[in-house]
Image (cartoon, rainbow, N blue to C red):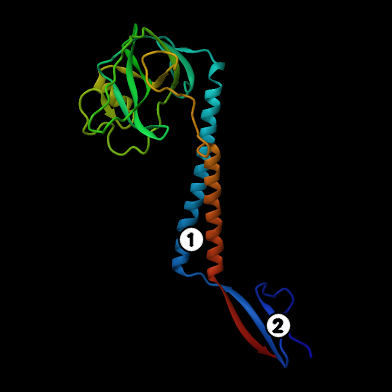
């Protein structure tokens, strides 16, 4: 007995032929018929998952760059912020020295800062640069929140420093900027959610350099200062890469599910 076969070059790769006794030929054919809703869901979710994966890879690269820049800090001569031009893009993790005095009457508390999983503030104190009308914000370190948010911690400058040193960067990290820099806040020290140099200049009445000088940990007059980026086990670049793998795996799983759910098997029998 001879069984029929498709013409050469026209065979469906999803079609399977199985002979039965008699003159019948059993054929199993797969058809891909995606519905509108799963198709739209996949078109929306797949690029989002892939984008999150690349975002985590970018975060890992940023953290590695920060660590590398900090480790190279000693290779360059320090900037004299009283006289040298300070470029915010080039000054990141650059050693710096300054002469002047702290404006102890108008200090800032940068909110939502953590140290060893404890919430607190970073104390930012303007430092008036000698021989100029400008100032630089000096990060004097981390201080715990205290008993409640209703009572701000007391911050003082106990020992005036006519000369300071440290390194420059953009200051402590902040989250998504929602609302103003200091909505509803009055008086000094001023609690702020992020650093807005323009608004701070209007409140202070003098020009600020577009960088933050993080006070050297060996100098007096500060709080907790652990400036090298600390990434506890699992929270450094390696964790971001792990998250990226997870997002890419989810995107792959989504495609597999989409194809598997919408690939239908159709059975039919044909006679010679």
In the image, residue 93 lies at what x, y percent?
A: 48, 22
Q: Is 42 drawn above or below residue 76 in the view shown?
A: below
Distance from disc 2 to disc 1, alpha carbons, whole Å, reads 35 Å
Residue at point 68%, 78% (across, down): 16
- In what quadrant of the picture does the C terminus appear? bottom right
Residue at point 48%, 47% (across, down): 52
In the image, residue 206 lies at what x, y percent?
A: 28, 16
Residue at point 59%, 80% (across, down): 266
Location of residue 211 by image quarter: top left
Q: Is 142 drawn above or below residue 259 in the view shown?
A: above
- Element type at mark 1: helix
Q: Which mark is residue 42?
A: 1
Q: Which mark is residue 131?
A: none
Marks 2 and 1 in Cβ contact (< 8 Å):
no
Residue at point 23%, 29% (across, down): 151
Location of residue 64 by image quarter: top right
The residue that disc 2 covers is: 18
Q: Is 42 drawn above or below residue 61 in the view shown?
A: below
């Amino acid at each position: 007995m001879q069984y029929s076969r498709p013409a050469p070059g026209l065979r469906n790769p999803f079609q399977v032929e199985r002979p039965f006794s008699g003159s019948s030929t059993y054929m199993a054919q797969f058809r891909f018929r995606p519905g509108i809703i799963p198709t739209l869901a996949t078109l929306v979710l797949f690029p989002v998952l892939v984008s999150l994966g690349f975002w985590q890879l970018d975060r890992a690269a940023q953290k590695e760059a920060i660590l590398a820049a900090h480790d190279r800090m000693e290779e360059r001569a320090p900037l004299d912020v009283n006289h040298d031009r300070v470029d915010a893009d080039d000054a990141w993790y650059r050693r710096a020295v300054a002469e002047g005095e702290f404006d102890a009457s108008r200090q800032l508390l940068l909110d939502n800062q953590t140290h060893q999983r404890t919430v607190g503030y970073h104390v930012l104190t303007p430092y008036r640069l000698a021989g100029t009308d400008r100032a630089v914000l000096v990060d004097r370190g981390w201080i715990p929140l205290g008993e409640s948010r209703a009572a701000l911690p007391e911050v003082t400058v106990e020992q005036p420093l006519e000369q300071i040193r440290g390194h420059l960067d953009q200051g402590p990290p902040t989250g998504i900027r929602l609302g103003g820099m200091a909505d509803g806040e009055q008086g000094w020290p001023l609690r702020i959610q992020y650093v807005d140099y323009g608004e701070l200049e209007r409140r202070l009445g003098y020009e600020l350099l577009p960088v933050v000088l993080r006070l050297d940990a060996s100098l007096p007059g500060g709080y907790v200062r652990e400036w090298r980026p600390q990434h506890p086990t699992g929270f450094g670049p390696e964790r971001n890469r792990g998250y990226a793998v997870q997002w890419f795996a989810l995107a792959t799983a989504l495609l597999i599910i989409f194809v598997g759910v919408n690939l239908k098997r159709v059975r039919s029998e044909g006679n010679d």
